[in-house]
Amino acid sequence: MQKIVYITYPLDNWENLDFMPTPMGTQILVPWASGAARGFSSDVLYDIKQSDGWVLVYNTFNTNILQPNPWFALYNKYRGLLRIYMYVNSATSTPSSYLTTGLNLGPNAINSSMLNYIGQDIVDVSQNNTTATKVEPTQIAPYTWYASQYEIAYDPKISTSTTDQINLNWFFQWTNVTTFAFSGNQYGSINGTISTPNQPSNLYSSLLKGALEATGIQVFDKYKNIPASIGLSANAIKAVENGLSSGLSGVVTNVFSAIFGGSSSNSQEVNLTINTQIHLDGTSTQNGAVIPYPGLGFFVPGTTMGNVAVNGYVPAYETPLGIFNISAKPIVHLVKSTYSTGTPQTIDNTFTNFGLTLDDNSFQKIFNPVVNSYITNYNESIMVINPITIIPYIDSTQLETIGTITAFQTNAFTVPSFVGAKYMPTAAIRISFNVKYPGCSGNGPLIVKTFLANVVTN
């Protein structure tokens, strides 16, 4: 069967348009226009400026024909965010309550890491994700705009790959779920956007590896009275709020994965991913799909055209997506030593020292050439993850609460030997930097990423 290549129509000066390009006699307000019906967060409403790094990637709107459920996609080259807008005009209102959208890779002959940043805040680079699904508390309705945003990880293999080796697919559907369980508590609805590296058919009646996403500093205000409704404790909610405030001022704490700032229209904008425990109970009924899984095929920006073995939309932006990645799982060397504070040696005065050293040769830092010359304030630190057995012996001021995880940043610590003799820490590397692009305000976006490490004893 012959495959189809779809063009991307031009969409010049979109931030100043009042209406989308359509055939004569039809008018559709742009999604950020006053009076447009919207089913997405207002936090990103005016974050569309080309001067902030947004470029057009795909577009089906044109003046010749109005397609069913037309859509377009923008990409921010300084934050690595892909945002897809769809105008639903062929679906009717349904009794469903949740929008389910996502991306998946297929074909994926190169084992790409493009989707590794979606649905998790600590990334294990030895296990690449092939699917990312989002569940959002909004209902499909006709003549309404929807927008889904995804953070893309930079994959340098893209620039040497063809469209036959890798393709990006986008799906857009809706579901009903009876009840939801977060941390053992049942609720009748989801609050906030949940993302997970699972297929949409595998979301329900199972414990998910998932994350809560936020796009503004005020997003957690509505969760303060019932914090468990999003799978987090009151202490975790407070810690996240502190982390958001600190991040917007340039200080990294209480987060593993976030993008702070970058929008000249909203100084409080963030793109936060934070872990939570999610269990979707009850009956799931897929009422239908505007774009069924696995979805529409997109040719990935930066690839070269192959033999067109799959259908796909040709991107208007021709450079690989994403800001940053690392080449391999980092190695942290651990040295244990014991000492005694008195004679004779007793259980009360014997201690274990833990020394942690990052092996800089175990991985390479890889920046997209688009932003490489704009990287400033680069920092990396070792994080000890969930140190349950040693928390009583650690200064509480060092601890960070990040969703359901407790962590602390350190290169060395000491605990009593009866604890340390059997303790083997789990470690991750938290990396942060600014992208100070031309014309940006201050230091530009602050990007935070955390990667699981291998701990090796010397």
Image (cartoon, rainbow, N blue to C red):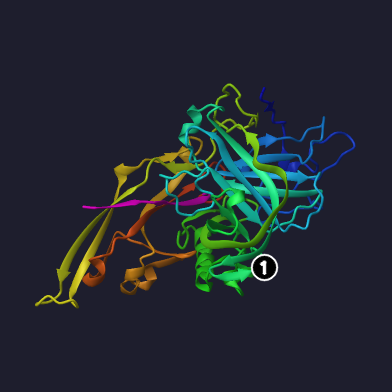
Q: Is residue 32 visible?
A: no
Which segment is the magenta one?
Answer: 444-458
Which one is nearer the viewer's eye here, 170 or 272? 170
Which one is nearer the viewer's eye here, 335 or 96? 96
Left/right placement of residue 353 relative to residue 14 reads left
Q: Position of residue 139 (x, y in %)?
A: 74, 56
The chief SS type of the magenta part is strand
Left/right placement of residue 83 relative to residue 324 reads right
Give amino acid for label 1.
Answer: Gly
Q: Is residue 344 visible?
A: yes
Tell me which residue sits at (36%, 51%) in the image.
Answer: 453
Tell me which residue sits at (49%, 50%) in the image.
Answer: 447
Q: Position of residue 409 (x, y in %)?
A: 36, 61
Indicate whether residue 423 is drawn in magenta.
Answer: no
Q: Quadrant of residue 393?
A: bottom left
The image quadrant where one finds the N terminus is top right
Q: Position of residue 256 (x, y in %)?
A: 46, 57
Which one is nearer the viewer's eye here, 209 or 455? 209
Q: Quadrant of residue 186?
A: bottom right
Which residue is most to the right?
Answer: 25
Looking at the picture, does residue 378 appear above or below residue 182? above
Q: Position of residue 308 (x, y in %)?
A: 61, 24
Indicate whether residue 449 is drawn in magenta.
Answer: yes
Mark 1 lies on residue:
188
